[in-house]
Structure formats: C-alpha cells, structure tokens
C-alpha cells in the first residue's frame, strides 16, 4: 500500500511540473512584471520619474531585442490600456513600443491609470498641460535607453496635440502621429505653434472631426504632412485602430504606410 502511495505522489508531482512549463512566465524584479507569450511577445511594466519626480507607469512591448522606437500616449480619461491591442500589432511590424500612463487620465480596458492615481495622492496637478512633462520624461527615458535613436511619438486626442507641440523643437523625436488633435489648451495656438514643422507628421480623426484637423495643420508644409480622412464615420483618437471600430483597416493601412516611409529616412 505504501508503494502505491509513493507512485501516485510521483505522478502528481510530474503532472504539476509539466503544467508549469506550459503556462506563461511571470517574473517579479524590482516591481517589474515580465510576461512572455507563445509568440515570444514580451510585455514589461516599469516605472520611471517624471520631471517633478512623479512615478510614471509604462508598459513595454517587444518581440525581439530591438530598441524602443514608438511612444504611445493616451487620450483624456484613459490609461496605457488604450494601446493593449494596438501595441501588439505594432510589434508584429517589427517595432518595440512603450505605452505610458499620463497624470491626466483614468481607466480603460480594465487598466487603471497608475500615474494619475499617484498624482492624486501627492496632490499634483492633473490637467492636460500638466501631463506634458510626463511625455517629455518618457521621450528622454527611451532616448537614453536606446542609445540615442530617435522616437516616433504617437498621441491620442489631447496627447496628440501635446505630441505635435513637442515634435516641433525636440530633436529626439523623429516623427509624430496625431489621432484627433485639436486646440485643446487655453492660451496656446497650436495651428501657429506647429507652422514650422520640418519632420514627418501623420494626422487623422473621425470623419466629423476632419475639417477641424485640416484647419489645425494647414500651416504645416505639405511635403511633411500626411492627413488621412476616413470615408466611414470613424471615431475619436486611436480607438480608430481598435478592431471594434468600423473602418479600422483603412486607418491601419494609412498609418502603416506612414511608418514604412520613415524606415527609408
């Protein structure tokens, strides 16, 4: 009877070990979460300080050892969760990307904005313009981590307007993609501020917003500008790239063409 008990125990132990090797690994290292999936996609959650030392939470997605070249910034009331599927699609194109939580935001796709939570606890400002320093800190972090390789900055709604403003003079930014930019900031004329652009700019929006976006960028040199106007209703911000959005394939096709053009530079 003892012999049978030992055999059964060994079988159970072997079964448990086999199951463990078949599941994704989660390793905790200095509050960093690393998840590896069956297609070798690695997602890492990190924190780094903003300009005023507020901890910024960010997700890094990569499928191979390539430097991060795309920075993803969310829209109002959202979090880095805005990009949980879009980021994966970008890794399939060969990019390593970072999606950040800015202090002006909340929750989307069941992912809470940890930077906004920390800002509220510390009593810091959480306006759109307050979040500019978070994006600047993320640009600096990536630039220093990837050996000085320039960054493609992607913004959604208010963050797309911040991205456009930052892209004008920040030499660390190679190009900007702005989804539904607008004149969102009191006392700042974006149309005038971005008139001197000398780097590639991609803009798009919902169909109803397209006239306003066209006016916003009408001073940008046409040789640097790509403006995609959807034929369908579309939607505000980078939700245009979500699989649930009608016509997302056309947004993706135009965005991919823009990204492809940057590889030739």
Image: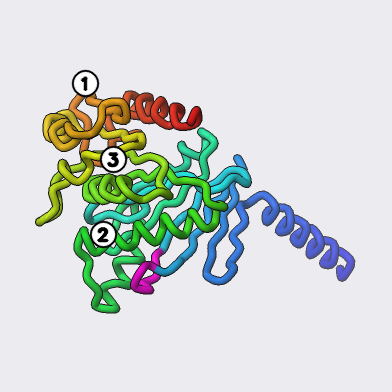
SS for dot 1:
loop
Given residues 127 and 107, the one toward you in this image is 127
Counting residues from the start of the chain, the first of labels 2 and 1 encountered is 2
What secondary structure do most residues of the magenta stretch adopt?
A: loop
Q: Quadrant of residue 5?
A: bottom right
* First of labels 1, 3 by sequence position: 3
Percent coordinates x, y for residue 245 in the rendering? 28, 33
Residue 55 belongs to the span the image colors magenta = yes
Q: Residues within 10 Å of mark 3 (few under 14, many from 20)?
A: many
Please report the residue visible at 57 percent of the width from the left and 52 percent of the height from the top: 147
For residue 105, the mark is: 2
Q: What residue is shown with label 3?
A: 178
As drawn, 146 above or below 27 = above
User: For mark 1, does the 10 Å Cα neighbourhood hold few (<14), some (14 to 19), or many (20 or more) residues?
Assistant: few
x 68%, y 53%: residue: 19
Q: Is residue 241 rendered to the left or right of residue 125?
A: right
Q: Looking at the image, is mark 1 or mark 3 nearer the viewer?
A: 3
Q: CA distance from mark 2 to mark 1?
A: 30 Å
Above-or-below relation of 215 to 130: above
Residue 165, percent from left and from top: 26, 49
Marks 3/2: CA–CA distance: 18 Å
Provide the residue span drawn in magenta.
Answer: 50-56
Q: Residue at x 47, y 41 (%)?
A: 88
> In the depicted view, which residue is nearer to us: 35 or 101?
101
Q: CA distance from mark 1 to mark 3?
A: 18 Å
Mark 1 touching mark 3, by CB under 8 A? no
Q: What scheme was used to colour the molecule?
A: rainbow
Tell me the quarter of the image containing the N terminus: bottom right
């Amino acid at each position: 009877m003892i012999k049978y008990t030992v055999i059964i125990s060994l079988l159970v132990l072997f079964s448990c070990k086999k199951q463990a090797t078949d599941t994704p690994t989660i390793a905790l290292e200095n509050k960093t979460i690393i998840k590896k999936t069956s297609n070798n996609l690695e997602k890492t959650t990190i924190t780094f300080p903003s300009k005023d030392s507020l901890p910024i939470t960010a997700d890094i997605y990569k499928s191979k050892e390539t430097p991060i070249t795309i920075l993803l910034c969310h829209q109002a009331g959202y979090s880095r969760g805005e990009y949980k599927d879009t980021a994966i699609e970008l890794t399939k194109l060969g990019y390593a990307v970072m999606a950040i939580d800015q202090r002006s935001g909340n929750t989307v796709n069941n992912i809470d904005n940890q930077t906004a939570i920390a800002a509220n606890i510390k009593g810091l400002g959480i306006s759109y313009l307050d979040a500019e320093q978070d994006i600047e800190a993320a640009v600096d972090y990536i630039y220093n981590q990837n050996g000085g390789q320039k960054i493609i900055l992607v913004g959604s709604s208010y963050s797309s307007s911040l991205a456009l403003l930052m892209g004008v003079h920040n030499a660390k930014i190679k190009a900007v993609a702005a989804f539904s930019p607008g004149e969102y900031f009191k006392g700042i004329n974006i149309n005038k501020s971005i008139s001197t652009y000398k780097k590639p700019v991609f803009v798009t929006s919902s169909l109803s917003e397209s006239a306003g976006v066209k006016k916003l960028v009408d001073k940008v040199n046409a040789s640097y500008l790509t403006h995609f106007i959807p034929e369908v209703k579309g939607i505000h911000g980078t939700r245009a790239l979500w699989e649930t959005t009608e016509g997302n394939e056309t947004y993706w096709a135009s965005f991919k063409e823009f990204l492809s053009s940057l590889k030739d530079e």
